[in-house]
Image (cartoon, grey):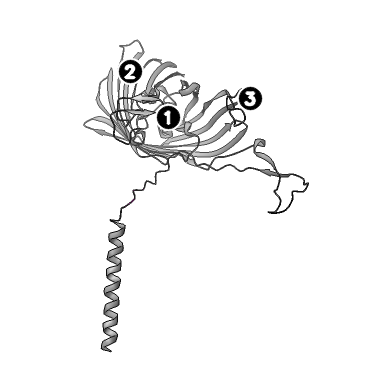
Amino acid sequence: MRNFSVVIGAAVVIAAMASSTGALAQGPVRQIPSDNTAYGTTAAEFLLFPAGARGAALGGSFAALTSDVSAVFFNPAGLAGMERPTAMGSSMNYLAGTRYGAIAIGFPMSGGSRALGLSIANFGFGDQPVYTAEDPQGDNGEVYSVNQTVLGLSYATRFSDRFSAGITAKFINDQLGRTTGQAGAVDFGTTFQAQVSGRPIRASFVIQNLGTTLQHSGNVLDVTVLRPPPQGQQPVQQEPALGSLKSKAWGLPVMFRVAVSYDVFSTSGSRFTALSEFLQPNNSEPGFNVAGEYNVGMGRSGFSVAGRAGFTYQPDNNLDPAGASSADYAGFASNVSGEGMDGFSAGGGIKYSRPGFGVGFDYAYRSLGVLGGVNMVTIALSW
């Protein structure tokens, strides 16, 4: 029995020494950092574009303030704040020759406690050369286009003088070359209004593009396949087999927003509103916006003018992970660190309003950092 105990003890000592030797040979265990952010895993990114120049100038930080027809794009609950029927149209020349446009119309109902809105937005480009391995220069004359469209039907209701909610049902059609994909989605938003120090404060919760996946199909995906002969056998004459390639189904860019706006001061002829918004997308890291809008009336003329500015912080825009003082990405050079590259936005507008008629013009500039900037204009009519 004593000999058996000695053997067991020796075995434990040897095992411990072997384990210690292996740990020393392998060195310290390092924890590999992991990032589960789903970068580049969604389609129809144009759904996140600000569809009105007023909201674009505020960096998109508009969900808690919107109370006109543009609410169908930012927060459908704001549609319940409309005072009369309004139609708007927006246009933006985006990067690399692409173009974005949006149209919306809204109708208040039931004395203003409810509202209905219709909207359409489109993004795309046309007649671009097709490059293939056989024709890397695209000289054969074949071209392709991209045409992405979303149709929306919005409904909003005011439950009290403080709380309203709204929903938008969307149909998305994505034409990519000779393939087409469809998807459905909904936006849901709420707005709560109160008073702080005698001045209005508004808080909003919005979730956008919650829906199905988008998968492309088309005749261009149909192929013919010749089955290779078994290994070691001579090929024999055969009929080609018909097949169809299957594209991946992509999710939509879901966005969660929590927004607050507060009238820092407000008089009968002027108002300054501060805004802030937290953003949590499903395809990148969270960010936030801060913005301000100053609006002043021009006496009894019916005219008013507004100035706006905003800043957006998005951590995933850091193009310089090494921490150098400059970034060189795809040939673009910058002297900034890269964080929040599309941060700055600004703009203004002028509006004329009389009983039974109103017209407004808004302009916005958005910086996209090393990629340059884009301009958006919006015209609105009310009656």
The amino acid pointed to by label 1 is Ala
Q: CA distance from mark 3 to mark 2?
A: 47 Å
Q: Is residue 88 magenta?
A: no
Front residue of 147 and 97: 97
382, above or below 256, in the image: above
Q: Residue at x 33, y 18 (%)?
A: 306
Q: CA distance from mark 1 to mark 3?
A: 41 Å
Q: What range is drawn magenta here?
A: 31-35
On the image, which quarter does residue 138 sit in?
top right
Q: CA distance from mark 1 to mark 2?
A: 18 Å
Q: Are marks 1 and 2 in contact (CB under 8 Å)?
A: no
Q: Which mark is residue 306?
A: 2
Q: Which residue is mark 1?
A: 71
Q: Residue at x 45, y 30 (%)?
A: 73
Most common SS among magenta residues: loop
Left or right: 347 as drawn, with respect to 185: left
Q: Which residue is mark 3?
A: 142
Front residue of 16 and 217: 16
256, above or below 98, in the image: below
Q: Earlier in the sequence, mark 1 or mark 2?
A: 1
- Label 1 sits on a secondary structure element that is helix
Residue sticking out furthest to the top: 301
Q: Are marks 1 and 3 in contact (CB under 8 Å)?
A: no
- Label 3 sits on a secondary structure element that is loop
